[in-house]
DNA sequence: GCCATGACGTTCC
DNA sequence: GGGAACGCCATGG
């Protein structure tokens, strides 16, 4: 909430506009391209404060799980899904999107293949102790 | 100026 | 592949 003025989020909006139709990008990706790799949350916040008439394809932005979060805003999530489907993006039974196919790759990487970062870097930083 | 909240991400098991 | 916990950063009160 907190009606942000969205004045300093222009770089973020610019990145979102760069997302081609039929493709989706994660908040972290947008944040990284905007210059804030750790401010993924703020990206979502910026989009929330954004208006539907700003011309920014906010519906092409989903979380890293390829799912629509829209905390509390169910109507927003429904609209987002409808828009994505209209662009040719298919949803899985669980409401998830196949990021391997519809995920936006600004680096123009070979289609059908993604570096993936799910379960590779494990011994990189285990100091976190996410769980006992 | 400090505390609480939030369209999330990444790591660990 | 899925669930849970910790972490980051910015806005609001």
Image (spheres, coloured by chain):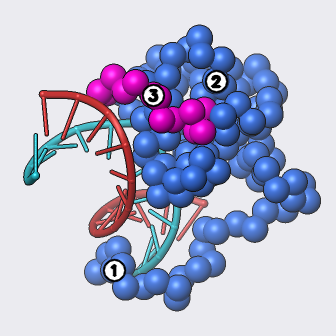
Chain colours: A blue, B cyan, C red
Which residue is tagged 1?
A129
Q: Are marks 1 and 3 on the same chain?
A: yes
Percent across and percent down for residue A40 are 49, 49
* Outermost right residue: A110
Which residue is tagged 2?
A56
Bin the neighbour count of mark 2 within 10 Å (Cα to Cα): few under 14, some 14-19, many 20 and up.
some
Percent across and percent down for residue B5 are 22, 38
Majority secondary structure in the magenta region:
loop
Q: Is residue A44 magenta?
A: no
Left or right of residue A84, residue A76 in this image: left
Secondary structure of residue under mark 1:
loop
Classify the position of the N terminus of chain A by image quarter.
Answer: top left
The answer for which chain carries disc 3 is A
Q: Which mark is residue A100?
A: none
Marks 2/1: CA–CA distance: 38 Å
Q: Are marks 2 and 1 on the same chain?
A: yes
Q: Residue at x 43, y 43 (%)?
A: A42
Q: Which mark is residue A6?
A: 3
Bin the neighbour count of mark 3 within 10 Å (Cα to Cα): few under 14, some 14-19, many 20 and up.
some
Badge 2 vs badge 3, beta-carbon distance below 8 Å: no
């Amino acid at each position: 909430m907190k009606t942000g003025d969205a004045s300093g989020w222009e770089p973020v909006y610019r990145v979102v506009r760069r997302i081609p139709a039929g493709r989706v990008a994660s908040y972290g990706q947008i944040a990284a391209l905007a210059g804030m790799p750790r401010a993924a949350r703020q990206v979502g916040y910026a989009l929330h404060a954004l208006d539907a008439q700003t011309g920014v394809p906010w519906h092409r932005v989903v979380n890293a799980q390829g799912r629509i979060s829209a905390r509390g805003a169910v109507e927003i999530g429904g609209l987002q899904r409808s828009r994505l489907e209209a662009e040719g993006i298919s949803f899985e039974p669980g409401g998830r999107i196949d990021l391997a196919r519809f995920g936006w790759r600004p680096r123009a990487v070979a289609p059908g293949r993604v570096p993936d970062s799910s379960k590779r870097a494990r011994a990189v930083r285990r100091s976190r102790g996410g769980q006992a």
